[in-house]
Amino acid sequence: MAEEFLRIDKLVKTFGGNQVVKGVDLSFNKGEFVSLLGPSGCGKTTILRMIAGFERPDSGRILVEGKDISGLAPNQRKIGMVFQAYALFPNMNVADNIGFGLKIAGMPKPQREARIEEMLQLIGLSGYGKRYPFELSGGQQQRVALARALAPSPRMLLLDEPLSALDAKIRVSLREQIRQIQRELGITTVFVTHDQEEALSISDRIVVLNTGNVEQFGQPFEIYNRPQTRFVATFVGTLNTLNATVADAGAKTVTLGGTTVTIPALPASARNGEAVALTMRPEAVSLANGATRDIVLDGKVAEVSFLGSVIRLKVDLGDNAVNLDTFNDQRTPPPAHGAPVRIGIASSDVLVLER
Ligand code: ATP
């Protein structure tokens, strides 16, 4: 059994009559990397700030290793935090930035210097101690901010969109470094992001939030493949939606593009003649002339997006359109715009989401 580290219990927060966190319950394990993922305004930052102690909950509790920390001031919580904007002290060099919390805590100079050196090594910036923030790239500044947060050996790390100000390439390499450092230290980490790809790639588990409520809490694999709500299915990843009509609810058949197909996921509550939305990920749709799939539909290529390792095609099916990904084998050029294609879908990959 994984050991529980952080528990959030019926947490509620209201700003000016607007409830932005609506009774959130969560439990994180020791050493876990958890992302809070959701659109702007869903309450991610507010939850993080309540954990840090910068915001006071209206009601509910936050427990660390079984102890309620709600009454503690931020500096008593032993939590490290990194913000979106670099927030380094511009007039202090890198070493002094990293050592700031240690100095406040009264650590003697020799120990402080040793710890700063250790932190510089951890973030791969040995020899940068005497530089000033303006002499560093954005990615380097964020690494220093991370070192500053970690220097006092916090028991938990909170990261509020720490990568969002960086350009795409640096973002990916820094997120890998953050994850590596987090693993090395085994520190329980809560990471706020609105970027689903970032959350999927970095997290042990993801909390998907929508308007102050938890929609789903699970591993990236579960969130992506087994979304429990329409919101999760559409917010995380690309989702195809095909409109169909229930043919025989008892037999779980629907009419789609003039043919009748069996959909194992059709809910028992479906009624004959009812319109249903069949959904599936792009990778559940294949070109291969539909040979190995039980749902076969004919269409025309409407859009070709070359993404590198995959080529995404949008196929117009008349009443419907689907996106599908084909693997770039570096030999076969993508089909031309307007070319006729046959697509295949495995009916077992189709989800039927509530309307
Ligand atoms: P974003 O990614 O845009 O930061 P978020 O999911 O982190 O979004 P929060 O920052 O937690 O969202 O904000 C949730 C809601 O609470 C928003 O509608 C926001 O305007 C409001 N809010 C946040 N802080 C305050 C505050 N101090 N006073 C009033 N309203 C606030």
Image (cartoon, rainbow, N blue to C red):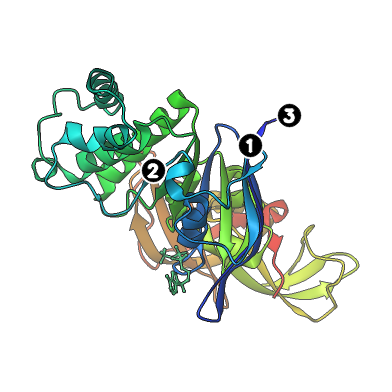
Q: CA distance from mark 3 to mark 2?
A: 42 Å
Residue 227 appears in the rendering = no
Q: Residues within 10 Å of mark 1 (few under 14, many from 20)?
A: some
Under tag 3, what secondary structure?
A: loop
Mark 1: secondary structure:
loop
Q: Nearer the viewer, mark 1 or mark 2?
A: 1
Residue 175, horizontal then vertical, whole percent: 36, 40
- Toward the viewer: 283 or 28? 28
Query: What residue is rendered at 69% in x and 74% in y?
Result: 244
**Up-down: is 103 above or below 84?**
above
Which residue carries the number 2 mark?
A: 328
Q: Residues within 10 Å of mark 3 (few under 14, many from 20)?
A: few
Dot 2: what SS? loop
Q: Is mark 1 within 8 Å of ligand 1?
A: no
Above or below for 86 versus 130: below
- Judge by depth and name the residue closer to the eye, 274 or 25: 25
- How far is the residue under mark 3 from the one under mark 1? 15 Å
| Amino acid type at image mark 2 | Asn
Q: If you read the primary sequence from the N terminus, does the residue marked by circle 1 or circle 2 appear first?
A: 1
Query: What residue does disc 1 label?
Result: 65
Residue 36 locus on image (x, y percent):
52, 53
Q: Position of residue 346 (x, y in %)?
A: 67, 52
> What label sits on residue 1 in the rendered view?
3
